[in-house]
Amino acid sequence: MMRSFVRTVLSALALCGAAAPEVPAQGTQLPAGDAFTARLGDRARAVPFVDHPDGGLALRADALAEGLGGQLVRDTARAERFRFVVGAVGADIEPGSAFAVVAADTVPLSAKVFRRAGLVYVPLAFAADLLPRFGTGVMYDTEKREIRRSAPAVASRRAAAPRMAAAAAPANTNVRAEPDRTAVRAPATRGGNRQRVVVVDAGHGGPDKGMSGPIGGGPKVYEKHIALDVAKQLQRALEERGIRVVMTRTTDTLIGLYDRGPMANAAKGDVFVSIHVNAANPRWKNPAAARGFETYFLSEAKTEDERRVAAMENEAVKFETKADVSRDDPLGFIMRDMAQNEHLRESMQLASFIQGAMRTVHPGPSRGVKQAGLAVLVTAFMPAVLVEIGFGSNPAEAKYITDPQRQAELAGKLADAVERYLAEYERKVGG
Ligand SMILES: [Zn+2]
């Protein structure tokens, strides 16, 4: 077991992948119509579009770039990577990845870039949201489905400090009803302190259902659904406590294990909490009887049981693309990485607060704070924990963790623990 976490983070950091904290594609309020137009001055060009495999629409990147007077250039060093150039701004994109790298900023997209029949497609939000934010002079007209570029952008190589671009952008781009949380890169302030950001990660998603249960029948439960429900409850609970939350997913979609951390980093998270459901090892004497909750922080797995969870949670890697798999590097186990090491003690502290808080409501037993080499935690450069809120393989516990009221209660306790951790951290660093 415990095979696939042994990888290097370097490539993951260089260019991250998969779906981002979702602004649902439908959030772009598409009017009826059947074409998109890219306009540069008087020149207009139709931009072919297709349905995005993960929902929403996607635009053909080369046509979009050319329509805006730019071009899509294949990276000579990395054939799978492309640079979308408009004016002085270049956005590096890669099929399979839901991130763009613009002037050294890693920017989450609403969905991944992908390739079809040799052509590269970007999610609509790339044109409607990302380009306008980065000083390209591009704006998106929702009603006309038109991506317009007015004057050439201010010709500074980093014209694109996102905040400045946002300030300078026309106020009527009218693209989203709701601000994209991940787009807010300026630290929000509250009472003079930087507002803390918690990245909440719902485990699994899409084709990766995670565990299913319970053993012996009864209403079927899937980990991916429970994880998402509890993650959303946790989001609510944290926001009620004045803590900003970034979700790695808000719908039933697959996000690569090694992409969740970089998403958290891009969101400038202070804490990363991944929610999961446990499953008994079928070889156990009475697997259906196993129950309880446990919290992991990243380290090498020490016990057989920790290895079981690591193997189970790292299993999702098989759903990822070939490109992801090539990140394998037997020598690259990230525990050697200083950045993560600094967070070990903090992660352990957070994990212990979480166990303590859950104990007050969860029927248990508490299986304690544990350590394992969990892929999802490897690339998050912040205190990061993975919570197994219960065993979906146990009939009673499967019922417990799918009950919305119980979920809310657990989420409230998780939020308490995170809040306590953040308060102690503030105190330590001198507020
Ligand atoms: Zn899981």
Image (spheres, rainbow, N blue to C red):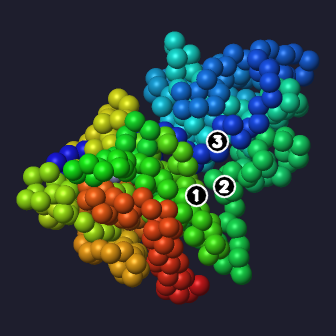
Residue 266's place in the image compared with 118, above or below, is below
Give the mark, 3 or 1, whose residue is nearer the N terminus.
3
- Secondary structure at numbered mark 3: loop
- Per the rendering, the mark at residue 24 is 3
- Secondary structure at numbered mark 1: strand
In percent of the image, x 28 and y 52: which residue is there? 214
Q: Which residue is mark 1?
A: 246
- Badge 2 density bin: few <14, some 14–19, many ≥20, Cα 10 Å: some
- Per the rendering, the mark at residue 15 is none
- Secondary structure at numbered mark 2: helix
Q: Which residue is mark 2?
A: 181
Which quarter of the figure has residue 4?
top left
Q: Residue pushed farthest top?
A: 117
Of 76 and 265, nearer the camera is: 265
Of 115 and 408, nearer the camera is: 408
Residue 374 shows in the view: no
Tell me whether circle 3 and circle 1 mark residues in contact (CB < 8 Å): no
Left or right of 225, for residue 246: right
- Which callout, 3 or 2, points to the residue nearer the camera? 3
Tell me whether circle 2 and circle 1 mark residues in contact (CB < 8 Å): yes
Rendered location of residue 136, percent (x, y) = 77, 36
- Badge 1 density bin: few <14, some 14–19, many ≥20, Cα 10 Å: many
Rendered location of residue 374, percent (x, y) = 30, 55
Amino acid on which disc 3 is placed: Pro
Rendered location of residue 228, percent (x, y) = 48, 53
- Which callout, 3 or 1, points to the residue nearer the camera? 3
Amino acid on which disc 1 is placed: Val
Residue 160's place in the image compared with 188, above or below, is above
